[in-house]
Amino acid sequence: MIYWAKFLAVFVLVNKMRQIGFFGGTFDPPHIAHRQMALAFADFLSLDEVILIPAGQPYHKNPTQTSTEHRLKMCCLLAESDSRLSVSDIDIVRQGATYTIDTLTIFQQTMPEVGLWWLMGSDSMRQFHTWRRYQELLHIANFAIACRGHDDFSDAENITKTLLEQGQKHAEQNQATRQIILLPTQPENISSTQIRTAIAHGEDVHQWIEPSVMAYIQENHLYQKQE
């Protein structure tokens, strides 16, 4: 299911507040570690849904190598692997650089009675203080952190404590700081950059990519080395 930005629906509460997770990234391409993170996110926090948000023009990352059309389609294919996953093009249809504060504000306004969670890797958490209006983000959504690479939980705990303190200092009267939760699982240590490089060199990457996504990459000759 795709949640098109201009047709975002307001979710109806049934017995309890729905809990929705958001997972943003360039997804160039989406791979099994992305899927592992998304599902660990959903399982640990009992989320009703996790929405993948492929980036348009992310201001804090290098430009994507693949068109928004291809990345959106690959995310949709990845989302088909589990009924709790869906995709939004909200950051693709907006013009110019996209900021998480704007994305979450739109969802907050559209889904006023839904609990919002944002998933990010520990590598992104280390750069969180560089995000636009990052203190305000801590009052809009809860955050879940998945440790990546060689990061460990003790280090992550110190960073999250500092972020919460900064968010509380920035809070206005009666404004609550949300939670920052560390996910107890760690995804496979693989990156989209590694996968693009491997494909360009003709290496087999099937173990890192969902079969439908791999088929799409091959059919559209993505990431192949240019002659």
Image (tube, helix red, strand yellow):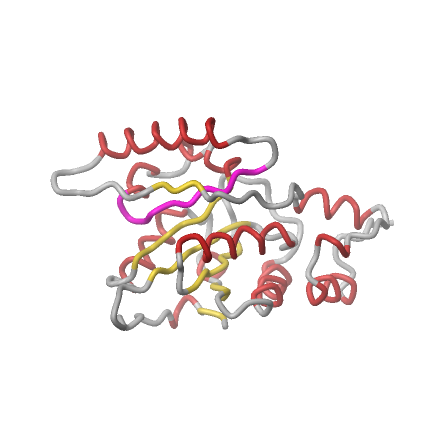
> Is 40 left or right of 140, judged from the image as shown?
right
Rendering coords of residue 72 (x, y %): 58, 63
* Residue at 33% from the left image edge and 55% from the top image edge: 116
> Is 130 left or right of 147, judged from the image as shown?
left
> Is 159 left or right of 200, judged from the image as shown?
left
* Residue at 56% from the left image edge and 43% from the top image edge: 186
Residue 201 or residue 49, whichever sits in front = 49
Q: What range is drawn magenta here?
A: 139-148
* Residue at 31% from the left image edge and 70% from the top image edge: 11
Q: How many marks?
A: 0
* Residue at 42% from the left image edge and 35% from the top image edge: 128
Q: Is residue 164 above or below residue 222?
A: above
| In the image, farthest residue toward the left | 173
Rendering coords of residue 6 (x, y %): 39, 69
Rendering coords of residue 44 (x, y %): 44, 52
Residue 137 or residue 14, whichever sits in front = 14
> Is 43 left or right of 81, judged from the image as shown?
left
Residue 13 or residue 135, whichever sits in front = 13
Assess whether residue 211 is covered by the magenta stretch.
no
Q: In this view, does 128 lie above or below 214?
A: above
Rendering coords of residue 135 (x, y %): 30, 36
